[in-house]
Image (tube, grey):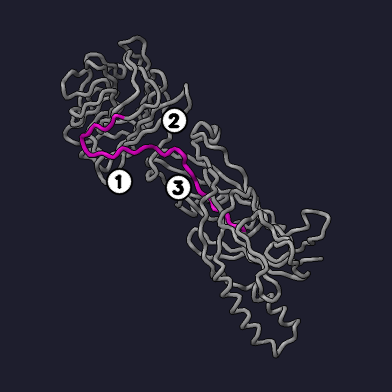
Amino acid sequence: MGYLLGIVRSGSDASMISTRFNRFKMSIVTRHSSFVIRQLSLLLFLLLPSVLSAQQDVTRNVTVNLRKDAAESNASLSGIDPFLPVTINPGVPVTLTANYGMIANGVATVDNRVEGPFNIGFPFTFYGNVYTKFSIGDNGWISFTHDINWGATRNIRLPSAAATSPKNCILGAMEDYDPGQEGGPFIFYQTVGQAPHRSLVVMWCQCPMVGCLSTPVTFQIVLKEGDTIETHISSKPVCTNWDNKCTMGIQDLTGYLCDTLPNKRRNSTSWSASQEGWRFVPTSLTTYSVTSIPYNIVPITPGDKIEYRWYEGSGTEPFSWDQTVVVVPNETTTYLVTATICNGEKFSETVTVTVEPQIPNAFAPNSIHPENAKFNIKGLPADYITMYNIKIYNRWGQMVFTSDDILDPWDGTLNNSGVDQCPDGVYVWVVYYETSNKSKVTNKGTVTLFR
């Protein structure tokens, strides 16, 4: 999972506010003592509205790894570094961005096509021959031979040596599909893992069925580095179309050798399946052993097939369906984000934002203790903080310090010059930020400088 955070403000708006304040101050100076002026100055800045704009800095980000089960290792899903905790002071906004991390290559196509060839990513052995490329048949199969004349075929019974039948192929769930419908691509692929344990995953994700567009299919063909094949079916409903026949199995280059499910099941028949897996392992150059295995879909997906939901604390209703949210907790809070891919598989992760309420209200630049020598707002780790902006004003409304970097504390001099020392007294600090719904917000307070 990924997180971004930040605040950036424009200096021109701050100048406008300062000018208006100075006019206000002049209108009362003939009627009030300097003490009253100082108090009104402080009150005005504590009530300052946030009228400044925000611009996101996307140069830094943190990934939050969404996973299927809490017991899974982070690396098993996408190899992304695990999330690190965030510690902030109240009023520091944290932008949380869920990064699914396994976005695959979409295959743009129309009905009855063969697309490719594409790189497998490693050598793969099939019926004794080694291949490095594959092609995708829209109707639910892949082949190590590229032949566009096989694209229109939607139903075969294995073995099939007919000229129009795909050969040298793996049929994940061969039926009549129409991936050219609006909302595609519905077919995509990705090579995942590290040698010697890489896998090529080819997935049909909510792919429309001809004649049954409202009941799409989701399944995968997986090639394991070496020679093992797996198929995983998330959902394959029965279609009532006139030619409802579907085949699972594999076939060699000649069309005379094949291996299907035990007892020739699902060989050009009408069937449905949900959350099941099958494995094909060669026992010789001409035969494969076919066994049932636990369903375990590899969670690749195209970006537009992901649905995000965010939950706060023990809440059961999501507060956002966006990939990115901005939160400003006043107390330590745990957030849960879920990602549902292809309208079925769900992955989740939590992140805890720890809030330390002790914002310093005084500091002494000449202190022998380094932690007391500067005024610092906490937001750690700092790389999670982008879009951050703080401004500090003296009792006359003059801005004496501004920074977009939370690791840049105020040292008590004008704009941290190290030369022009600001006098002791009370100063107003204002943190500006913008929420995910573009609402402009401020957090403000005072700090006393001692010399």
Q: Residue furthest bottom?
A: 31
Badge 3 marks a residue whose secondary structure is strand
Judge from the rendering whether residue 33 lies leftward or rightward of residue 190; answer left or right: right
Residue in the image at 34% along x and 14% along y? 288
Q: Is residue 328 above or below residue 218?
A: below
Mark toward the viewer: 1 or 2 = 2
Label 2 is placed on what type of residue? Val
Q: Residue furthest top?
A: 284
Q: Is residue 202 above or below residue 63?
A: above
Label 1 is placed on what type of residue? Gly
N-terminal label among 1 and 2:
1
The x and y percentages for residue 281 are 38, 16
Q: Residue furthest right?
A: 368
The x and y percentages for residue 333 are 61, 51
Q: Mark 3 packing: few (<14 Cα in 10 Å), some, or many (20+)?
A: many
Judge from the rendering whether residue 308 lies leftward or rightward of residue 85; answer left or right: left
Looking at this view, is 208 or 143 the one in front? 143
Whether 179 is among the magenta residues is no
Judge from the rendering whether residue 97 lies leftward or rightward of residue 177; answer left or right: right
Residue in the image at 38% along x and 20% along y? 123
According to the image, label 3 marks what residue?
308
Judge from the rendering whether residue 9 lies leftward or rightward of residue 180; answer left or right: right
Looking at this view, is 362 or 70 the one in front? 362
The x and y percentages for residue 37 are 71, 82
According to the image, label 1 marks what residue?
183
Looking at this view, is 45 or 157 the one in front? 45
Q: CA distance from mark 2 to mark 3?
A: 23 Å
Instruction: Report the predominant secondary structure element of the magenta stretch.
Output: loop
Badge 2 marks a residue whose secondary structure is strand
According to the image, label 2 marks what residue?
192
Is the Cβ of the residue at disc 1 closer than 8 Å to that at disc 2? no
Span of residues in magenta: 92-117
